[in-house]
Amino acid sequence: MKTMETNVRKLFERYENISKASLRGDVAMDEVAALYASEFIAATPAGVMTGKNDEHLKQVLAKGYAHYRAIGTKAMEMRGLRIAPVDEYHCVAHVSWRATYVRKNQSDVVIDFEVHYLVQHLGAEPKVFGWVSGDEQTLLRERGVI
């Protein structure tokens, strides 16, 4: 279990670094896609979706990072990580994030939130195969970001 925990921590450190680079416009979609399993599931208050780690995912991710840059996202930092093992191959990684948004002629907006990632560790590196998150759009509207 210790190896899985160490590797999952490295996964999310990589995730954070890749996100920071993508927010700067240094988008490496192959690196982003490498964080995910071949198929995944996502659940938000808007519903549940499934997807494949393919060219379409890379396009969606690139569009997503472009959107985050357009709304003024200047930083995404991991504040904390708690790992809950399920078995020797799976865990839930509870990641606390802090996002900072720049607004014209106003002070920055800082929003703390959590995403719960489903992680599988079968090969050399763990992969995200799912996540559960809150209502991002409502939160951004309430905080005056969008």
Image (tube, rainbow, N blue to C red):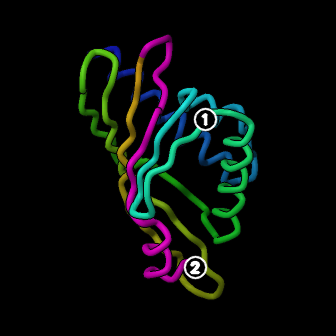
> Residue 31 location in percent, x, y?
67, 32
Q: Residue drawn 54% across and 31% down?
A: 39
Q: Is residue 13 magenta?
A: no
Up/down of 88 relative to 103, above or below: above
Up/down of 59 relative to 1, above or below: below
User: Between residues 118 and 43, which one lies in front from this camera angle?
Assistant: 43
> Residue 38 location in percent, x, y?
57, 27
Disc 2 crowd, CA 10 A, few/some/many (<14, 14-19, 20+):
few
Q: Residue placed farthest to the bottom in the image?
A: 105
Quarter of the image containing the C terminus?
bottom right
- Helix, strand or loop at label 2? It is loop
Amino acid type shown at disc 2:
Ile
Residue 45 image-quadrant placement:
bottom left
Q: Residue drawn 51% across and 83% down?
A: 144
User: Between residues 140 and 18, which one lies in front from this camera angle?
Assistant: 140
> Residue 55 location in percent, x, y?
74, 37
- Tally of numbered discs: 2
Task: Give the numbered dot on residue 38.
Answer: none
Amino acid type shown at disc 1:
Lys
Up/down of 63 relative to 8, above or below: below
Please identify, in this view, whether the residue under mark 2 or under mark 1 is nearer the observer.
1
Q: Is residue 145 magenta?
A: yes
| Residue holding disc 2 | 146
Q: What span is in magenta?
A: 122-146
Q: Residue drawn 43% across and 81% down?
A: 142
- Helix, strand or loop at label 1? It is strand
Q: Earlier in the sequence, mark 2 or mark 1?
A: 1
| Residue holding disc 1 | 52
> Residue 6 location in percent, x, y?
36, 21
Residue 28 image-quadrant placement:
top right
